[in-house]
Amino acid sequence: MAEHDEPREGALLLDDDDDGLEPTTDAGPPPDDGKADEAANALDEVLDLIDLDVDIDIREDNSEQVVLDLVGPDAGRAIGKKGQTLDALQFIVNKIVNRPPKSRRHVVVDCGDYRERHDRGLVTMAKRQAKKAVEQGKVVTLEPMSARDRRVIHLSLAKFEGVSTSSHGHGTGRRIQIIPARSRSRR
């Protein structure tokens, strides 16, 4: 496999199933490297500092990633607007846990399957917009979104017949364009 074909750390890997949401993982025993406990402790300290009343469940601990699930009265506040607080917590915990020269494992911070529900909504919206692009024969430009959300959409439409996708813009203003096959030849 070429170097650019290797999955990147933290990448959402998708199967060929219809909804494109099931992550693929190697089903092996979890390593005993202490990363799950270290990540949970780091997250607990950060949550105490921002005064959120949530508990942390280590929902999954496999060789590729650690999933920390937040439950409790402040779970909604832990998600934040469009998942921004979850993303920030995940970023901070990954920086704490994966400092060199230690081994690296991706930490996912979730709250009641928020990420799975959010991804399903993105895929549904992307397919609806792709159908619209094909029917109208026009490029459809989506609202700006995070890199993770753009990746979910690109992957969900990769095998959608009659369209291609491309990202345009910079930073927080980066958008996906869904391009119908007829428009592709004009470009």
Image: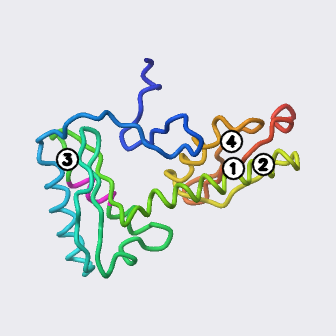
Give the label, 3 or 2, closer to the camera: 2
Kind of residue at disc 4: Thr
Looking at this view, is 45 or 55 the one in front?
Answer: 55
Task: Identify residue for label 2.
Answer: 131
Mark with earlier residue (2, 4): 2
- In the displayed structure, 24 sits above or below 75; it is above
Task: Identify residue for label 4.
Answer: 165
Who's the residue at 46% across and 56% down the image? 116
Task: Identify residue for label 3.
Answer: 99
The magenta stretch spans residue 48 = no
Who's the residue at 77% across and 52% down the image? 140
User: In the image, residue 161 lies at what x, y percent?
Assistant: 74, 35
Label 3: how many Cα within 10 Å (few below 14, some 14–19, many 20+)? few
Give the label, 3 or 1, closer to the camera: 1
Who's the residue at 11% across and 41% down the image? 32
Quadrant the C terminus occupies: top right
Mark 1 in CB contact with mark 4 (< 8 angstroms): no
Mark with earlier residue (3, 1): 3
Mark with earlier residue (3, 2): 3
The magenta stretch spans residue 95 = yes
Q: Gap between marks 3 and 1, in whole Å?
A: 39 Å
As drawn, the label of residue 127 is: 1
Label 1: how many Cα within 10 Å (few below 14, some 14–19, many 20+)? some
Q: Gap between marks 1 and 2, in whole Å?
A: 6 Å
Task: Give the secondary structure at mark 4.
Answer: strand
Kind of residue at disc 1: Lys
Left-right relation of 160 to 19: right
Who's the residue at 45% across and 18% down the image? 2
Magenta segment range?
A: 90-96
As drawn, the label of residue 98 is: none
